[in-house]
Image: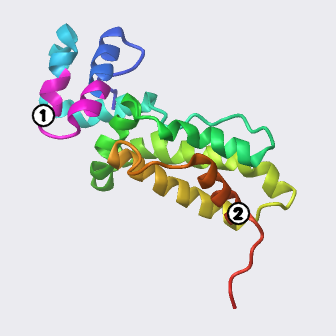
Amino acid sequence: MPRRFDWASPSSRMVLSAALDALSEVGYGERTLPDIRARAGAAGELVEESDLLELVATALERVRVFTPPEPTGDLRADLAVLLRPWLARPGRDELAVAAVLSAGAWEPRLGCAVLHAFDRPLTQAVGALLAGAVADGRVAVTRVHTLNWLLRGLALDRLRGGQPRCPVDLEELVDHLIAGLGPGRRPG
């Protein structure tokens, strides 16, 4: 089935950008479609009632909540670079993803869009940062999965709250995460 909206078309780009703006400011719900139409100007006339799901899923194709840092081999510094942006207020793309988190749980197309914009990039960033440490035995493979889930939980909390719930000492958080990656043993 051909898509009505595509990032390659100038008029579609106006509508898709308006969709991201609307998601970040009014959320995902009954007010979203009229808001998209108004924000898209003349291109808003292209939007029909049944278009909301396609618009949102297509708009989220251009969103990347995480920019994976280039691994330097210094795991502590690399984690700090990954987490540092989380201390700032969320931007438009993060707020757009946050707007569809709940809907993504019951609407497969939105769930897939969230996977591509949020979950997959986070997993890839964590994997890239830890690949060298896993290869040389400093970090157990099982700890990579654990770290990914911890970071996902922190990121979800940030998205749902709009900002950290309380001041976070980034250095202390990174130290805690690094300590958790060590080869510790479970108690008896």
Q: Amino acid at mark 2?
A: Ala
From the viewer's side, name the closer residue of 65 and 81: 81
Q: Which mark is residue 31?
A: 1
Identify the residue shown where x is 75% and y is 74%.
184
Asked whether residue 48 appears in the rendered view, the answer is no
Provide the residue designation for mark 2: 179
Q: Which mark is residue 62?
A: none
Task: Say few, some or many: other residues with alpha carbon within 10 Å of mark 2 (under 14 / 14 to 19 / 20 or more).
Answer: few
Residue 92 left/right relative to 37: right
Secondary structure type for disc 1: loop
Say which residue appears at 59% left-offset and 49% top-offset: 123
> For this view, does 61 lie left or right of residue 178?
left
In the rendered structure, does residue 25 fall within the stretch colored magenta? yes
Of the 4 image quadrants, the one containing the C terminus is bottom right
Range of residues picked out in magenta:
20-36
Q: Please give left or right for residue 67 compared with residue 6 in the image.
A: right
Q: Position of residue 12 (x, y in %)?
A: 31, 16
Is residue 176 visible in the rendered structure shown here?
yes
The front one of 62 and 87 is 87
**3D distance between C-alphas at marks 2 and 1:** 46 Å
Q: Quadrant of the N terminus?
A: top left
